[in-house]
Amino acid sequence: MATPSIDTLHATLAPFGQAHVLKFWDELDAGQQSELAAQIESFDLDQLRELYQSQDSENHWGALAAQSTVPPAITLDDFADEQSFESAYQTGAKLIGDGKVGMIIVAGGQGSRLGFDHPKGMYPIGPISEKSLFQIFIEKVIARARQFASTIPLYIMTSPPTHEETIAYLNQENFFGMNPEDVMIFCQGVMPAVDGDGKLLLEEKGKIFVSPDGHGGALLALEKSGALADMKKRGIEHSFYGQIDNPLVQVCDPALLGYHSQSGSEMTSQVVRKSDPFQKVGNVVTSNGKAQIIEYSDLPEENAKETNPDGSLRLWAGSIAVHIFKTDFFDRMSQTANSLPFHRAHKKVAFVNSSGESIQPDQNNAVKFEKFIFDLLPSAQNAIICEVDPADGFNAVKNAPPANAETPDHVKAAISDLHTRWLNECGIVVNDEVKIEISPLFAPDSRALKGKIDADPNFARTISADTYLQ
Ligand code: UTP
């Protein structure tokens, strides 16, 4: 198709005050002009203007928090109750065994805080093995499927900045042993950002700055890519959802799936009991029968600090971005226009100014627009939350050292501590300072490990050197 003329593009942009992006048009070659024109035509400038003009944050969070409670919850006490747990476990095990469970991993983020020059999933995180986040996740999926003699298809969401490299990496690694036919890599969309005056930013003279449209972009991308159709074709009824940066995710945990299914929940979220009122996790609350998340930055201090008569936090449930979705729910929501709102984030974005100079701002100069998958919660029927001990399920790689939390070293230590505890629960003594790593293919969880150790009379009763069980 021929590239539209500069006059046509000008006529599209000018009513929205965005014609400045054509400033360097005459300096561009034909290929660059055509790419810039395609970018311009892909934008919804009306929507962008509306988003820019919308309030930064509506001031209703205090009122909402005051009238909210916590959604129906399966707590650690329920997981510890043998009868309740066993019934949930068997329900989940059957779903997996019957091939009704899929796994979604979102890996489209740019990992800017970590400062790693590749998709975050390629980051080596195994405390001894140095396996990458992708390898650990994929082996968890393989192991879980094997446990129940089934197949769990894996849907990996990338974004334009991570897509090609992720595909090349997984191909080169032969999908870490997973059948490529059971892996679908799909790419999310992008959104332009604007400056303080609502103007588009040029990343280069012939390229408007865009960035991935948030993990909530998964909803549209699942539909557009055919991943949702693939789920339906395979008879997948529930999708387990995790983020690539948390290698502790209890991938397709049978009990979690069981509680979700037994509750008739369309969307189940795993939560931690907040360790302090201001912990930086989204607060899962319910009001008028609708579950939703209040971001920690939006929860007023007095609501965050409210306690129950026993002194525990009233709004105690912090989201760790692990969810289970019913396929029917995805299907319904992907047919619903604007089912996910955009959130605004103030960020630093390098740009080319009107003199053609590249500017590296030292403070936030742009507003990015992102969708969050957890905004599906209010639309879900019978949404429940399931508590997990963070030591069992939550430690994400976010920051580069020397940050005091969420660095690769913190996450490696959390993996080693968890696997040490699994061994301890099997009666194995692990000496202090010893690092432990258990491959998901050796045992995907403590229950599987116990079965394996009980069946092996020669398994060492004491471990005194760094050990990788594989
Ligand atoms: P974060 O918001 O923590 O972003 O994403 P990030 O890319 O990992 O790191 P920063 O903020 O740039 O330092 C949480 C999860 O959501 C995914 C990420 O890949 C990560 O698994 N995500 C985020 C997407 O898949 N797409 C997005 O547009 C944003």
Image (cartoon, rainbow, N blue to C red):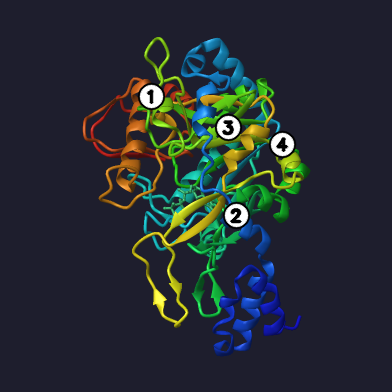
* Residue that lies at the very extreme toward the left in this rendered image: 432
**Amino acid at dot 3:** Gln
* SS type, badge 3: strand
Per the model, the C-alpha gap separating discs 3 and 1 is 19 Å
Cα distance between the residues tagged 2 and 3: 21 Å
Residue located beneath label 1 in the image: 305
Residue shown at 65% from the left, 22% from the top: 91
Disc number lying in front (4 or 1): 1
Mark on residue 292?
A: 3
Task: Locate residue 320 relative to residue 338 in the image: left or right.
Answer: left
User: Residue 450 location in percent, x, y?
Assistant: 44, 23
Mark with earlier residue (3, 1): 3
The local crowd at label 1, few if under 14, some if 14 to 19, many if 20 or more residues have their Cα within 10 Å, is some
SS state under label 2: helix
- Disc 1 from disc 2: Cα separation: 32 Å
Amino acid tagged 2: Leu
The disc labelled 4 sits on which kind of residue? Answer: Phe
The residue that disc 2 covers is 51
Q: Please report whichever mark, 3 or 4, sits nearer to the chain's N-terminal start.
A: 3
Whether residues under marks 2 and 3 lie with C-beta atoms below 8 angstroms apart, the answer is: no
Residue 54 position, x and y percent, is 58, 51
Instruction: Check the picture and name the quadrant holding the C terminus.
Output: top left
In 3D space, how far apart are the residues under numbered discs 4 and 1 (Cα atoms)? 34 Å
